[in-house]
Amino acid sequence: MKRSATPGNGVSQVSDGKSPNHTRATYQKVLDGRKRPIRGLWRRGNRFYGQLRLTDPVTGAKVPRRIPLGDEENPVTNITEAKAALAALITDRDREDVKVRPRAPRFTDYAAQYLERAKGTKRDTSLYKERIMLNRWGEHFGDKRLRDIRKRDVMAFREKMIGEGLSPNTVNKYQFALSNVFKLAIADEIVDDSPTRNIPPLKFDTKRRELITAEQIDKVCKEARKHSKNGELFGDYVRLLAFSGARRNEGLALKWLDVDFERGQLHIGSQGDAKNRLPRTVDMTARLKTHLEGMFKRRQPDSEFLFPSPQRGNADRSTKTFRETLEIARKHSGVDL
């Protein structure tokens, strides 16, 4: 590899030996007017850097570190300013932004740490969704470390998701999950800023959906029973949501202990799985009470859940989703439930 000086610009360039016009995008020594390298002064693109040997707080070894001179609001634009900024940097090398920090972890490793530390502060369903989204971010970033991720990396993946047909609302959720990881990294003093900062969420229109009628619910449940082995359980689930006002995941988590026939009440979110972790009690209407009584007669005797998983084996757990049955019922009923 040969190093040559380019007349007139005061900066050396690096040749790969293959092409005289090829310049590698890397740090370059800054030269004075006599083509001599200025000690400790480097340039990459339009940015000047000062190099110091600093003490690594972990190993105690002296390590070289290049610190950008100036900032975006007050950039160093010429060699004279760069030399003055370097002199000031040498004098004030104890500045917080100059200190050597331990190497930042890879995004995939730190995202896993974030999810582990979030246990107990978020619902399992929320963590499950975040894990899926962060895994995709990890695939996009590869082996990149937190400090190496830039705004352009985030924008590139947003464009990729949009190209795949994901809705703007879904893309925003991916970005929010990424922001959560970097918020923790900032709190841990691993990074100074988040690459998602100043990236506004995508705009989208919330479609107003028509209310589902009782006749449509009956039609969906009827088709589910005809075409799915889980049709009866699915029908019980849909009707319970309609009669109680419970949300999707709240309904799936209900246990028979939450059903108080004596007082005529249904306790939603008693296991901390309600929206915003706020449990509530619903007074049973005549329809809800009749429906629950019918479900109780048909209940699985070996499960405490209203909607036990058909594949639970020896472990008692609730159904996680009725998505497959829902799609079958939609197809055959023509109702967009």
Image (cartoon, grey):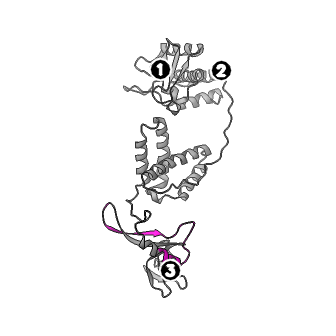
**Front position among marks 3 and 2:** 3
Residue 92, image x, y percentages: 42, 70
Residue nearest the observer in this picture, 313 or 282? 282
What element does badge 2 sit on?
helix
Q: Earlier in the sequence, mark 3 or mark 2?
A: 3
Q: Residue under label 1, please give it.
A: 258
Q: Which residue is located at x 52 percent, y 80 percent? A: 80
Quarter of the image holding residue 74?
A: bottom right
Q: Residues within 10 Å of mark 3 (few under 14, many from 20)?
A: many
Image check: 64 left or right of 246? left
Q: Is residue 314 left or right of residue 252?
A: left
> Which mark sits nearer the N-terminus, 1 or 3?
3
Which residue lies under the disc numbered 2?
214
Marks 3 and 2 sit apart, C-alpha to C-alpha, by: 77 Å
- Residue receiving disc 3: 11
Q: Nearer the viewer, mark 2 or mark 1?
A: 1
- List x then y, in percent, for residue 1: 42, 79
At x 47%, y 35%, the residue is 123
Q: Earlier in the sequence, mark 2 or mark 1?
A: 2
Tell me the element at label 1: helix
Q: Which residues are magenta?
A: 58-85
Left or right: residue 215 compared with residue 253: right
Neighbor class of circle 1 (other Cα within 10 Å; few <14, some 14-19, many 20+) is: some
Q: Residue 310: within the magenta?
A: no
The residue type indicated by label 2 comes to Ala
**Residue drawn at (43%, 46%) of the image:** 114
Q: Identify the amino acid type marked 3.
A: Val
Relative vertical location of residue 269 with respect to residue 73 in this rendering, above or below: above
Q: Amino acid at mark 1?
A: Asp
- Residue 63 counted in the magenta span: yes
